[in-house]
């Protein structure tokens, strides 16, 4: 039970006096003890953002920007570089011929490829070409560099758990001594070793990030189509799959989960809420998301955020394929996760 303490002059004086010793009375605490955060639902529309990414290419040279990234900041967190209290979202653009130099850092990073062909990312000695709809894993502290050897600009979404490393005071980063790292694994190595429901004989399950570098879109899309044809839809999520870490059956990162869902044309989902903070990225289709009573029309490449405990529901005007990532593994590990259909 919480109630305000009776404010006697002695008590007021006491509370004031102890401030100089960096002490504060719990009985006067005003911070929220409810679910949810100050963050607001918000949408970043491709029609607004794409021209700005191209403009940034004119204004910022690759030599001046280690990564040419526009950060998606929650309106309630201006200047703090996060899309929600626990998640970072950026949009990165790389032009033909450019290289984003090799470095590593303690935050884990995911990429969701949005537009263009011809870019690659190299992670821990292996290179993967990036194709729209691919989900790519950059485990924490692994060297990574990107490049564009094609003929058109390439854009992807970066999702990082840097809010966690900032929270813990555990953010470290290093530049690699040369612009690109040496490649000591053939392209496709991680897919061959871990990506076919097979594992190397001497493999020991581990709790880190997924050993699969790239989860290709065509396979994800095929799996979703099969699901839609053969299984009943979830009342809120339609057909939804989570990207699995084959090493332990859990998530691609200890902190972040990633999903892809298909909402068939005409789908009208029941509202859902979760303490997960969720960033959605529309791969295909048009629809409407209602988040905390606000309606957001969405189309391909739009990104929207449903912060913790904001109820959301989808209506699909066309077949929609939507990628998302959340802080679910961290909340499951701590026992904090709660979710419900409304
Ligand atoms: C980073 O290393 C990348 O490697 C992208 O492409 C975005 C945001 C914050 C910190 C590091 C990248 C990032 C980042």
Image (spheres, rainbow, N blue to C red):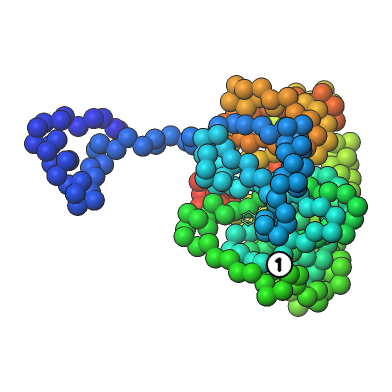
Q: How many marks?
A: 1
- Pick the front one: 5 or 139: 139
Residue that label 1 marks: 102
Q: Position of residue 49 (x, y in %)?
A: 72, 36
| Residue 249 in view in this figure | no
110 or 267, nearer to the observer = 110
Q: Is residue 335 left or right of residue 249?
A: left
Quarter of the image for residue 50 reads top right
User: Percent from the top left, x then y, of residue 27?
Assistant: 24, 38
Q: Residue at x 76, y 56 (%)?
A: 136
The picture quadrant where one finds residue 302 is top right
- State yes or no: Cβ of the residue under disc 1 lies below 8 Å from any atom of ligand 1: no
Q: Position of residue 11 (x, y in %)?
A: 13, 37
Q: Quadrant of the C terminus?
A: top right
Image height check: is 219 above or below 128? Answer: above
Where residue 326 appears, as percent x and y from the top left, is: 63, 45
The answer to whether residue 116 shows anywhere in this view is yes
Position of 75 with respect to 24 (left or right) is right
Q: Is residue 299 left or right of residue 106?
A: right
* Residue found at x 52% / y 45%: 80
Residue depicted at x 76% and y 78%? 202
Quarter holding ligand 1: bottom right
């Amino acid at each position: 039970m919480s109630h305000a303490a009776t404010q006697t002059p002695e008590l007021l004086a006491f509370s004031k006096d102890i401030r100089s010793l960096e002490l504060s009375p719990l009985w006067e605490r005003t911070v929220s003890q409810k679910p949810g955060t100050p963050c607001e639902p918000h949408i970043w529309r491709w029609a607004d953002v794409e021209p700005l990414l191209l403009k940034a290419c004119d204004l910022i040279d690759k030599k001046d920007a280690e990564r040419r990234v526009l950060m998606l900041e929650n309106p309630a967190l201006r200047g703090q570089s996060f899309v929600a209290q626990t998640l970072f979202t950026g949009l990165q653009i790389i032009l033909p011929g450019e290289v984003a130099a090799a470095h590593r850092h303690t935050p884990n990073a995911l990429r969701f490829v949005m537009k263009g062909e011809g870019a690659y990312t190299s992670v821990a000695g292996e290179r993967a070409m990036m194709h729209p709809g691919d989900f790519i894993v950059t485990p924490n502290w692994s060297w990574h560099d990107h490049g564009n050897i094609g003929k058109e600009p390439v854009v992807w979404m970066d999702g990082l758990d840097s809010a966690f490393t900032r929270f813990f005071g555990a953010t470290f980063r290093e530049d690699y001594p040369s612009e690109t790292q040496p490649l000591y694994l053939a392209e496709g190595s991680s897919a061959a070793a871990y990506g076919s429901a097979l594992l190397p004989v001497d493999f020991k399950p581990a709790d880190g990030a997924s050993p699969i570098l790239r989860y290709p879109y065509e396979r994800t899309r095929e799996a979703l189509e099969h699901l839609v044809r053969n299984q009943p839809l979830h009342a809120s999520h339609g057909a939804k799959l989570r990207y699995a870490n084959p090493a332990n059956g859990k998530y691609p990162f200890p902190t972040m989960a990633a999903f892809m869902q298909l909402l068939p044309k005409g789908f009208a989902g029941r509202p859902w809420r979760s303490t997960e903070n969720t960033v959605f990225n529309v791969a295909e289709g048009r629809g409407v998301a209602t988040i905390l009573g606000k309606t957001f029309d969405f189309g391909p490449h739009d990104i929207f955020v449903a912060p913790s405990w904001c109820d959301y529901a989808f209506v699909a005007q066309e077949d929609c394929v939507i990628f998302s990532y959340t802080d679910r593994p961290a909340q499951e590990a701590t026992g904090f996760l709660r979710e419900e259909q409304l």
